[in-house]
Amino acid sequence: MSELPSRAPEAVALPPAHAAVRAGARVRGGAPRTGGALRQLWRVARLDASESLRSRWFAVYTAVFGGVVALLFVFSLTESRILGFMGLSRLLVTYVQLCLAILPIFVLITTVRSVAGDREAGVFEYLLSLPVGLAAWFWGRTLARLLVVYLPVLLAMATAAGWAVVQGIEVPWGLFARYAALLGSLCACFLGLAMGISAVARTVDVAQGAAFALWLALVLFLDLVLLGVLVQQHVPAETVVALALANPLQVFRTAALMLFDPDLVLLGPAAFVIFDVFGKPGYFAFALAYPAALGTAAATLGYWRFRRTDLL
């Protein structure tokens, strides 16, 4: 009878998660190639987009914006007139204002589950064993989510424009393009903020609570409480306007209002400060660039934190 081994075999040391991921992103005998990284990013984005398209939240999300446009047509909003706007222009103005109320919180709540949900479910050990780099995995999911949250908004607008063409209603394509660009910038802003929160938070509950608190602060605190206190304390108008324009929701709201009211009569004296600093074309460019840059910065900070923390 053969003798049993006197001691247990030594445990095999497993490489760290980051090393395993980097090894998967490398080719034989060298550093990762740009083409390979781009292919990885595309595959991750395609996989995440296909999963999102099959999810229930996407069906509800699409139905909400499609239902909004349908209701606006049902109530014959294209036949009403306000401040000289009628037809599809009147519908687009109302649609964009409704998007301002619905889109940010919907994007935040659905996206913060992305990274935090995988961490809480314990699937990172499996995900990080795949031959995909951390950058490709994170940014691939970010780009896929951006397309998934923006396309239903744009599709609803395109459906309204198509129906208007069929009904013989004039379509203001210039206004359509500017509103579509503003909504894309808004989507990029809150998607980036959500990805940053999701990468930092350890659990889904913490991520969703932080996302809701951020949305509440942007909607209520900065616009109503803080600005009211500043006005009472006789703070210079330039300071009040600068603080207000730090809020991406306020930036979007003002730009959408400027397309509806080019002189911003409804804003009162604040309009003169905005036009003196930016001018009309300059402010619209700022309204496109600032929210997108803020979202990109938040997502980049989340990715930096994501790389340097214990993923398992």
Image (cartoon, rainbow, N blue to C red):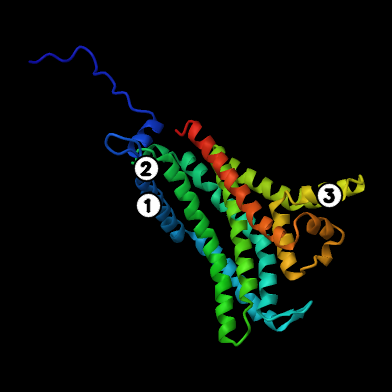
N-term-proximal mark, 3 vs 1: 1
Q: Residue placed at 46% from the left, 57% from the top?
A: 52
User: Which quarter of the figure has residue 130?
Assistant: top left
For the N terminus, which image quadrant? Answer: top left
Circle 2: residue type: Val
Note whether residue 57 is visible. Answer: no
Instruction: Find out whether the residues at labels 2 and 1 contact each other: C-beta distance under 8 Å.
Output: yes
Note whether residue 155 is visible. Answer: yes
Drawn side of residue 164 relative to residue 283, left or right: left
Say what secondary structure mark 2 lies in.
loop
For the C terminus, which image quadrant? Answer: top left
Q: Which mark is residue 238?
A: 3
* Residue occupied by mark 1: 43
Q: Residue placed at 38% from the left, 38% from the top?
A: 128
Instruction: Find out whether the residues at labels 3 and 1 contact each other: C-beta distance under 8 Å.
Output: no
Q: Residue placed at 43% from the left, 60% from the top?
A: 54
